[in-house]
Image (cartoon, helix red, strand yellow):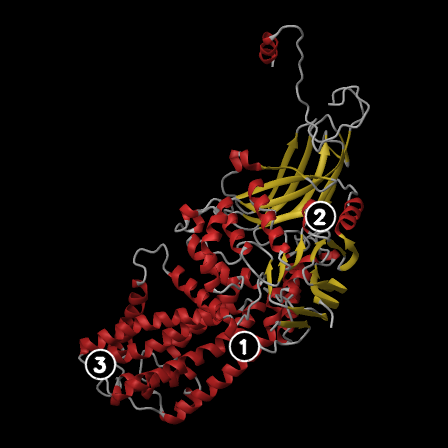
Amino acid sequence: MQDIVIIEAGRSERHYWLDLWRYRELFRVLAWRDLSVRYKQTVIGVLWALIRPFLSMLVLTIIFGRIAGLPSDGNAPYALMVFSGMLPWTFFSGSLSGASNSLVTNSNLISKVYFPRLIVPIATVVVAFVDFLISFGIMVLLMAWYQFVPDWRILLLPVFVAFAFFASVGPALWITALNVKYRDFNYVIPFIVQFGLYVSPVGFSSSVVPEKWRLLYSLNPMVGVIDGFRWCILGGQSALYLPGLAAGLGVTAFFLWFGVRHFRKTEKSFADLI
Amino acid sequence: MTDAVITVENLSKSYLVGHVSEKRGSHNNATLRDAIARGARDFTRKAADMLRGRQIVQGDEVEEFWALKDVSFEVKQGEVLGIIGRNGAGKSTLLKILSRITEPTKGRVLLRGRVSSLLEVGTGFHAELTGRENIFLNGAILGMTQREIHNKFDEIVAFAEVERFLDTPVKRYSSGMYVRLAFAVAAHLEPEILIVDEVLAVGDAEFQKKCLGKIEEVTGHGRTVLFVSHNMPTINRLCRRCMLLDGGQIKIDGAAQAVTAQYMVSDTGTIAAREWPEGQRPGDEVARLIAVRVSQHGQISESVDIRYPVDVQMMYEIFKQNANLISAFSFFDSQGVLLFVTGDLNDLEWSRPRSRGVYASACRVPGNLFSEGVVRVVAEVATRQPVYQIHVLEYDSVAFQVVDSGEPGSVRGGWGRPIPGAMRPLCEWQTAKDQGEAGFHSIRVSA
């Protein structure tokens, strides 16, 4: 069977998703490349992935738990609560900032070879996911330290990992595509990431938010993700606010649809604009 | 149903280019007020563009530029088609559309078969990764499966002659090794349609020969190849059919020999000085070419006396701090044969990294070296370290006529007939008579 390709203005690939599948090896290789060059020429290498979240956890625990004296979820140790919120947050911020720069840093590929461009930003999400797994190792150690035993809810964690993935991919694709055209977004991302850390319930429990604002607050999809993580990891200590979760899912679905649509619409002109 | 594997119908592609309008063309705005007013105007225009989702164009006059216009042709199974033309004729745009990197503005292309394009050697090479890792990375980027690469791995390594350095990061490679490795991966692609841009102009002569051999081998296997080159002998050797593009349109399409001959004739117009206005300067984000000129005895001249040195100069701007660059000129004769390349490699003072700024480099070619006829100059600015990378390669720079007036001082002496050869260096001749073996010695001593 011969491949027939028709190139026309404004014509989107008929087999786009099939093509994406066909290029899965490239996806794997790019993710592998990003991972393997990550800590080249550093002394402590992959330890960086351990030290950074650990230190941030310490700082947030001291500021919010000790100095501000905010309550934890139920009887869970404050540090554990902070860390279970930081897991999805660092994954989210890592994939958002990695993906949004990915097309520009790979401009040499974009302007010289064809492949479904979606591969590049998604491959960087894999890098963030590996960091997430490493952090998860710290989480396990922390739980052992506090002698905290999770219950059956931990089995639902993968569902919220997927939620975190989709919550970051949607906005990431949208901003990635915009960043190719308008480099202003290079400056917006670090700001979102920094700001978001304090706006999202990372250093504190979302139960400290007044009840009447709670639904509005949950429009930030990371609220639902973080609450979900805490619910899974801290067991019965953290309650799940269902209307907020639904709102977060809705916003995530919208951004995912919007991000993919915008990306696909502009993808063909990337090589001309980059 | 035709047996055409590539069908191109009325293909057009336009770009938006911005100009800085004449009256405000100078960079030094007269007053601060002017500068602020201009900044505000730029901002409102860009913001408006962004709100409408349009592309931002620098400059205050936006013009539509047609890089390709109504191009139609067909390529049959197994055909090797050469594509030639000046810089800016639309060759690269055509290849980019056919490789699906960019979308046409109008028109339609039908491709039957798996397409691989090779617009650059070493696309996606990562300096931190080892040679071995880069083979897999580059192979995947060019569309090979990991299995294919595995099967051909030894062949690729042998072709590149880098066995000993497989586990060294490529940033420690010499530029020759780097290019060889990059080409070796590309040479083992096995698509049904292969699209190749000027990639043979790399490596030393020995390696180029090997590359040409490989390409010939590929074309011999019934594969369809589109091949862009500035090197006419290569086009003639590899292709039977050739297409000349000019101003985004097909000017001639026919037998390679005829088309290249016609191109050389039409292209031998001489021009001694060339300057590119801002916005059209050849180059990239590291360096851009501003001007090239040819002079003799301090005068810009399209025709030079064969007996005296020729000064070739270029002016270029460096945008990147601490770039370790070389500037070089290549000289081609009217047949498209490369006479020689010279670069400021032996200028030790400038072999260190250069700061940002506008540079002028001059090269003096000794007298009595060129042959008579037209010499075309190709200007190049490239990074020499850590990885050889071309920033400017301007084929369409200057050309001059070398004239031997027959006056004393040239190789010609009193000889009235043509002297063949691509070069005509003044060699020292001595003759001794009736001295036996001693004759050789007496000549050598005096030399």
For the question of whether residue A149 can be seen, the reply is: yes
Relative to B328, say whether B63 is above or below.
below
Q: Secondary structure at mark 2?
A: helix
Task: Confirm or deny contact between disc 2 and disc 3 (CB under 8 A).
Answer: no
The part of the image, by quadrant, that contains residue B314 is top right
- Residue matched to label 3: A77
**Cα distance in 3D space between marks 2 and 3:** 78 Å
The amino acid type of the residue labelled 3 equals Pro
Instruction: Give the image location of residue A52, x and y in percent.
Output: 31, 67
The N terminus of chain B, quarter of image: bottom right
Count neighbours of disc 2 (C-alpha within 10 A) and say few if under 14, some if 14 to 19, many if 20 or more: some
The amino acid type of the residue labelled 1 equals Leu
Count neighbours of disc 3 (C-alpha within 10 A) and say few if under 14, some if 14 to 19, many if 20 or more: some
Q: Which residue is located at x 76 percent, y 65 percent?
A: B72
The part of the image, by quadrant, that contains residue B210 is top right
The earlier-in-sequence mark between 1 and 3 is 1
How many tags in the picture?
A: 3
- Residue matched to label 1: A18
For the question of whether residue B129 can be seen, the reply is: no
Q: Which mark is residue B236?
A: 2
Q: Nearer the viewer, mark 1 or mark 3?
A: 1
The part of the image, by quadrant, that contains residue B51 is bottom right
